[in-house]
Amino acid sequence: MDDKNKKDIDVKGKLEKNEKLSALLTWSDSLVFFIVLIIIGIILTIYNILLGSIAIIAILYLAYYQSRLIKEKQTEIYNYIEEMNDDFDEITRGAVFSMPFPLVIISLTGKIKWYNTKFKNIIDDEDESLLNKNVIDLVSDFNEENIKKLKEEKVIDANLDKKHFRFFANYFDKIGESEEEVILLYGVDRTSEYNLAKTYSDEGLAILVIYQDNYDEVKNSTDEALRPILFAEIDSVISSFAKKHQGYARKYEQDKYLLIMNNKELNNIIESKFSLLDDIKEINKGSNIPATLSIGASSDGENPLDIYQKARTSVDIALGRGGDQAVVKKGEDLSYFGGKNKALEKRNKVKARVISHALKQLIDQSSDVFIMGHRNPDMDALGAGLGILEAVKLQDKKGYIVLNESVPAIDNIYNRLKNEYEDFDKTFIDSDTAISRCSQGSLVIVVDNHRKNSCECPELLDITNKIVLIDHHRRGSDYIKDAMIAYIAPYASSASEMVTEILFYMTDKLDIPPIVAEALLAGITVDTKNFYYQTGVRTFEAASILKRQGADSLEVKQLFRDDAFTVRSVSQIVANSKTYKEGIAIGTNEEEVEESILIAAQAADNLLNIIGTEASFVLTKAKGKIHISGRSLGKISVQLILEKIGGGGHLTSAGAQLDMSMEDAVKTLEAAIDSYLEEDKDESYID
């Protein structure tokens, strides 16, 4: 735009402004008065021409004088406003440059367009000029994402020059010749408030609840003469840990401790990745099994009781995830530390027997029972569901399995059930039917899953509060709360193993149909990868129970047969896979078919057969999303990797779903792997 056009625009603007000002001072408001005077003058002329003429001349002179007076006043107003505008511009410029707080104008990409001296002074930069530099490179708390959000959110906090500033934003659309969008930021020093809030937070109450999660196993594996020395050493390590962090430790049961300290020390413990977990495992006083702890911690609550209850909930989550880890609850976030070791098998079956009797009573007290697993069910979910249905029948109650549709992973057993299982059509119902039949008196049993959003029919959990969870996956932060029975055993091979034990203790003479026994055995088989992974003594004991109930191993083998297309697809994924990092293989399946998830799971299993591969991930398209199957030989926790992106499962077997493109999903997975590998043994992560 040239100078002439700019001048024309300025002139036009002034004219428009003057027109508006003229409306403030005009003789049009006196028009009625002059009209009345003229009428009177005309009337006088009729009666007396001389007197009327004098009156009209006087009226015209008054009108002329009023017009000149108004024009002079308007000129004075215009001159005053022009002078005021010039003074105001000068005052504004002076005020901006002498502002007592930092000012900076940036583009939406963070490029600095202008800044004042205050901003320059708080930026630790040796260059004389900051123009055209990117504020992201100068202020660590600024990034592309939060700069773009300034158009709506208008506030951003940053630490500069050992002070804490809160920057407020004004967004301007198309400024200057370039018509570029810019943001004016002005910072307010809030260091005092920030330090006060930090002091308040540091001095807040923090509570740690500590369980020795394998007390019985350690006790039984230690020579009787050495047991007092071992447990005294554990007490001493925990007491010294509390003293080191200026806390108070109290042992209130033989395997339970309570630690009280301030929040600042809890943050120090978090930074050390809960070194207490390793300190306890290093104790060697004659036990063949290292002692491990489960720790729940919290500093978030309205009062000490509230903080304790949240710490207690956190330790339950740690136990539900297999123990040997710490869980910290702050706000809505749960932080996990440790948990990279395989869950230790519990040889004691007391809990299974207690759960069996409690479940029996709940079934007796319920009007009917609805059983469901997770969406896209596998053989373990269906097998466990059929086992629980037999438990319901033992109590002469109506039972239903909620299943919306069969999927390739269960097609073989599902087709057999349609032909061989009694009352198949009445037993298997979809979600709509289940919702219409379920009432407050109904019992809902969730198997092979403990997350509401993963259930086949989540709506059932809102209809009744009589809920039972039976699962072998490590507990995540989004687990179903307030269940009447939550039997979560990460040391178990499968939900089918857990259900088999429940059935065994529910009656003196177990008698279930062979097809149900085969479904349960198939569930154990698929989750242990033919009894290779997560297999303990109780796994084989459960298998022997099912064999006595008529389970045919050959028939179970038939359930895992695949068609030629599936076999070829699995082979193609394995052949085209890549090694992302040493020991970690990633494969992808771009073709979305009905068997996509089954193909991905089998491909992930097969990748582990390659020498040097410790973990494998296969991504596939399924129902508009990207499904990830993760498998491991035990050295790498695929559970911890996939939990970083919203998934979950076991140390050796886990899964996740992402709503993005395949390319972005691969990048997201790789970032999660990188984060996992960069962590120390007890590095934390947040859900």
Image: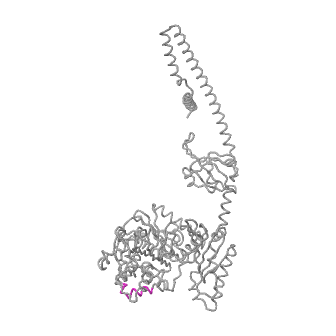
Q: How is the image coloured?
A: one colour
Q: Position of residue 180 (x, y in %)?
A: 55, 44
Q: Is residue 559 left or right of residue 581?
A: left
Residues 219 and 487: in front is 487
- Kindly identify the residue that appears in the image at 47 percent across and 61 percent down: 663
**Above or below, comparing residue 44 to residue 522 in the picture:** above
Q: Position of residue 207 (x, y in %)?
A: 62, 72
Task: State the extent of the magenta-drawn residues as a range.
Answer: 540-553
Q: Is residue 407 left or right of residue 74?
A: left
**Above or below, comparing residue 239 to residue 685 in the picture:** below
For residue 598, say whether it is visible.
no
Q: Position of residue 353 (x, y in %)?
A: 46, 85
- Kindly identify the residue that appears in the image at 60 percent across and 89 percent down: 222
- The verdict on residue 551 being magenta is yes
Residue 678, quarter of the rendered image: bottom right
**Above or below, comparing residue 172 to residue 62 in the picture:** below
